[in-house]
Image (cartoon, rainbow, N blue to C red):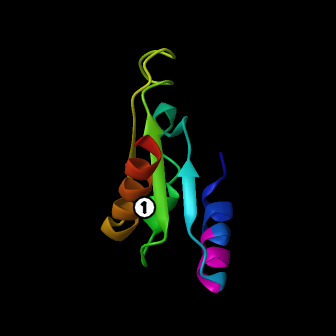
Amino acid sequence: SLDAERKRDLYAVARRYGLIILEDDPYYWLQFGAARTPSLLSMDVDGRVLRFDSTSKLLASGARVGWATGPAALIERLELHTQASNL
């Protein structure tokens, strides 16, 4: 995982060049310190981060349950792509 400063730098580069960030940090929910390192999604101010989570590190590696979180416009596009590929 990236520390908070590197995440801020990454987000600044994405903003400068108009990039979308796909955040996949399976160990985020396993941070047991005083404060969690913020996610890129929590830093998102202009709708450019899609965050992917799953239960594989929390419950069991065989539990293949996952979800995406992000701005509605990006989630809708993701749903359309998923529907097209699953047909």
Q: Residue 48 location, x and y as percent? A: 49, 71
Which residue lies under the disc numbered 1?
A: 42
Using the image as rendered, state which of residue 25 and residue 77 is in the foreground: 77
Using the image as rendered, state which of residue 72 and residue 82 is in the foreground: 82
Quadrant showing the N terminus:
top right
Q: Residue at x 68, y 62 (%)?
A: 6
Q: Residue 86 location, x and y as percent? A: 42, 41
In the image, is residue 27 part of the stretch drawn in magenta?
A: no
The correct choice, above or below, for 35 with respect to 77 in the image is above
Q: Residue at x 48, y 46 (%)?
A: 36
Q: Residue at x 62, y 62 (%)?
A: 7
Q: Main secondary structure of the magenta part?
A: helix
Q: Is residue 10 left or right of residue 44?
A: right
Quadrant showing the C terminus:
top left
Q: Badge 1: few (under 14), some or many (20 or more) residues near its Cα, within 10 Å? A: few
Q: Is residue 73 left or right of residue 53?
A: left
Res. 13 in view: yes
What are the residue bounds of the magenta stretch?
11-16
Q: Residue 55 location, x and y as percent? A: 42, 27
Outermost residue toward the front in this view: 87
Question: Tag 1, which secondary structure?
Answer: helix
